[in-house]
Amino acid sequence: MLPEQQQTSWLQRLHIDPPLFLALLVISVVSLFTVYSASGESMAMTERQVIRVGAAFVAMFVIAQIPLDSVQRWSLPIFSVGLVLLVAVLLVGESSKGAQRWLNLGVATIQPSELMKLAVPMAIAWFIAEQGMPPTLTRLAGAFLLLIIPVLMIANQPDLGTSLLIACSGIFVLFLAGMSWKLIGFFAVAIGSFIPVLWMFLMRDYQRQRVLTFLDPERDPLGAGYQIIQSKIAIGSGGIEGKGWLHGTQSQLEFLPERHTDFIFSVFSEEFGLLGVVGLFALYGFIIFRGMIIAMRAQRVYQKLLAGSLTLTFFIYVMVNVGMVSGLLPVVGVPLPLISYGGTSMVTLFAGFGLLMAIATNRRLVHA
């Protein structure tokens, strides 16, 4: 056996997909440099990010070792545990900044909505695969019920951004399962007709303010519109080549709020310019492309649906954050995936990539 073949075989048996792993490693390094700059050159915050990135890679590696039959078999129990935790958040959850999203377990405080980012597509993919393909209208209705319950519970916390992302993850499973365009059109119309109800009865005052600010940020440039105005200034001032690492005036002079979390893309754009943004998008594009290749080559229906949903949802993550900080979408508090400072979201994303790697390497091992 050639040395290259031995290395590939070794990685496969560790359930590591080399192209995806390399892309994640590169973008994680980019994250550390960007967080260091966005945090005002805080070594303490950067060190915490290093620890979190390390924990995320460990989570990815551990999950990649789980047999896919076990993942499929445990999809519904994991989803059920997630629902129980969401109910617990509703009853005894901890509140912060007007939102009740966290659950104190004594040894740790967790955010159950992060678990549902994986549990919802896993459960819906399991339901569709168990019932057989193509899904009938009754089966789609059952899958939609699995989706809408956690989405409404999370939206009520309130956490509109996470609820929309979870809704997308479930809808992508249904779309990949072969849901007809007529049904897609019906759901689009139904969602559109529900918007007035959402605006009048379900959205909080600050959420309505975000939508109004998105439509006209200059109506309150020193208040509600301040974030998005400063963000667009930062992105535009980067030009073609950027101002250089650690030399972004909007971030370093603290004009840009939440610059190490939700608005870190603005920091990156100001310092690395259009060329840096194109490079970052190329990394994201490669990860998404690799994920879809894994989905297409998957052996079973469940694996195809899950891999496709996780990959397309990651795409939505990127587009929502970039659209949010550039003024193309309302601000919904979604971090830039794999770049923003944070722990729980990072680990959740890498856990999803662990599932993708398990699916990718399972196919190779079967054919070995």
Image: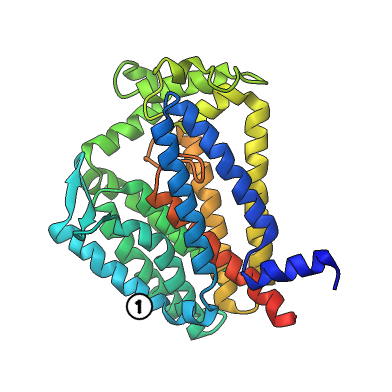
Q: Is residue 230 above or below residue 343?
A: above
Decide if residue 33 is on the left or right side of residue 44.
right
* Among the 4 quarters of the image, the one containing residue 149: bottom left
Which residue is labeled 1 in the image?
77
* Among the 4 quarters of the image, the one containing residue 360: bottom right
Q: Is residue 56 above or below residue 256?
A: below
The quadrant the C terminus occupies is: bottom right
Tag 1: residue type? Pro
Decide if residue 55 is on the left or right side of residue 270.
left
- Residue ID at (60%, 50%): 24
- Residue ID at (39%, 69%): 144
Which residue is at the front of the view, 268 or 17? 17
Q: Secondary structure at mark 1?
A: helix
The quadrant the N terminus occupies is: bottom right
Q: Is residue 137 above or below residue 109?
A: below
The 10 Å Cα crowd at callout 1, few under 14, some 14 to 19, many 20 or more, is few
Image spot of residue 366 (x, y percent): 69, 82
Q: Is residue 30 above or below residue 59?
A: above
- Describe the colour scheme in one phrase: rainbow
Decide if residue 321 is on the left or right side of residue 88.
right
Image spot of residue 169 (x, y percent): 47, 60
Q: Is residue 62 visible?
A: yes
Which residue is at the front of the view, 160 or 281? 281
Image spot of residue 312 (x, y percent): 56, 56
In the orientation shown, which residue stands out farthest toward the bottom? 131
